[in-house]
Image: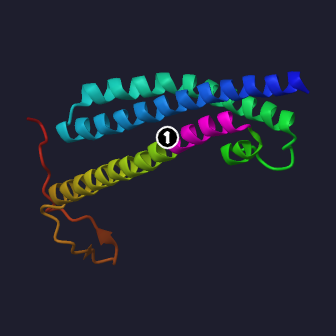
């Protein structure tokens, strides 16, 4: 029984380290969202490309970390006998001793606040990008429909003809 308790405590320590890494990842993601909004506003395509490359490079690392966390949670679920229900931090808190329970609760509170902040920043970024797309569509529509009256012309045979007085724009600077 004592070795099982020590094994559980070791796994909880590994989980706590994973949760700390999750917190760092969310903070990094928040920073990237802020940088993305800033670069979109500045229209810095080169820096946006570099940001995209760094995000793509980190995605594989985060995926392996996520698999490690899930593995630790499965092992903890087996060790404490929670195979019927999904292992969450709340379920884990209920079966841990007081000292470990407090550590898990503290990590859970930090992650919850970071996730709420991330949701807000994500919504702000999505709104900005949506407005940029809407504005670009309006701008392009106004440029290419400049001479278009919206009238439809028919030939003597009743076949529609393409409007010939549409203005074309030379976009070279």
Which residue does the image show at 74% across and 29% down from the upper left?
71
Which residue does the image show at 67% across and 43% down from the upper left?
89
Q: Residue furthest left?
A: 173
Q: Is residue 122 left or right of residue 77?
A: left
Q: How far across and how far down the image is residue 85, in percent?
A: 81, 50
- The residue lying toward the viewer, choosing from 12 and 170, is 12
- The residue lying toward the viewer, choosing from 10 and 113, is 10
- The residue lying toward the viewer, choosing from 83 and 96, is 96
Q: Is residue 169 left or right of residue 162?
A: left
The residue singled out by tag 1 in the image is 110
Q: Is residue 2 left or right of residue 50?
A: right
Q: Residue furthest right?
A: 1
Which residue does the image show at 49% across and 24% down from the upper left?
58
Q: How many marks overall?
A: 1
Q: Is residue 4 magenta?
A: no
Q: How far across and how far down the image is residue 19, in percent?
A: 58, 32
Label 1: element kind: helix
Q: Is residue 130 above or below residue 14?
A: below
Crowding at mark 1 (Cα within 10 Å: few <14, some 14-19, many 20+):
some
- The residue lying toward the viewer, choosing from 117 and 110, is 110
Query: Looking at the magenta stretch, what is its main secondary structure?
Result: helix
Q: Name the image quarter holding residue 149.
A: bottom left
Q: How far across and how far down the image is residue 115, in percent?
A: 48, 45
Q: How far across and how far down the image is residue 70, in percent?
A: 71, 33
Q: Is residue 11 above or below residue 98?
A: above
Q: Is residue 107 magenta?
A: yes
Which residue does the image show at 14% across and 51% down from the upper left?
168
Q: State which quarter of the image contains the N terminus.
A: top right
Region rendered in magenta: 97-111
Q: Residue furthest front?
A: 98
> Which colour style is shown?
rainbow
């Amino acid at each position: 029984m004592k070795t099982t308790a020590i094994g559980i405590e070791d796994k909880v320590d590994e989980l706590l380290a994973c949760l700390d890494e999750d917190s760092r990842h969310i903070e990094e993601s928040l920073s990237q969202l802020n940088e993305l909004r800033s670069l979109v506003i500045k229209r810095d395509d080169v820096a946006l490309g570099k940001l995209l490359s760094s995000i793509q490079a980190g995605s594989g690392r985060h995926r392996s970390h996520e698999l490690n966390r899930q593995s630790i949670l499965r092992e903890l679920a087996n060790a404490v006998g929670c195979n019927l229900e999904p292992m969450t931090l709340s379920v884990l808190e209920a079966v841990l001793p007081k000292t470990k329970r407090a550590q898990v609760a503290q990590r859970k509170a930090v992650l919850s606040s970071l996730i709420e902040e991330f949701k807000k920043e994500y919504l702000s970024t999505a709104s900005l990008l949506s407005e940029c797309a809407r504005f670009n569509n309006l701008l392009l529509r106004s440029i290419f429909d400049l001479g278009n009256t919206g009238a439809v012309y028919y030939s003597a045979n009743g076949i529609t003809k393409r409007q010939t007085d549409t203005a074309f724009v030379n976009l070279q600077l």
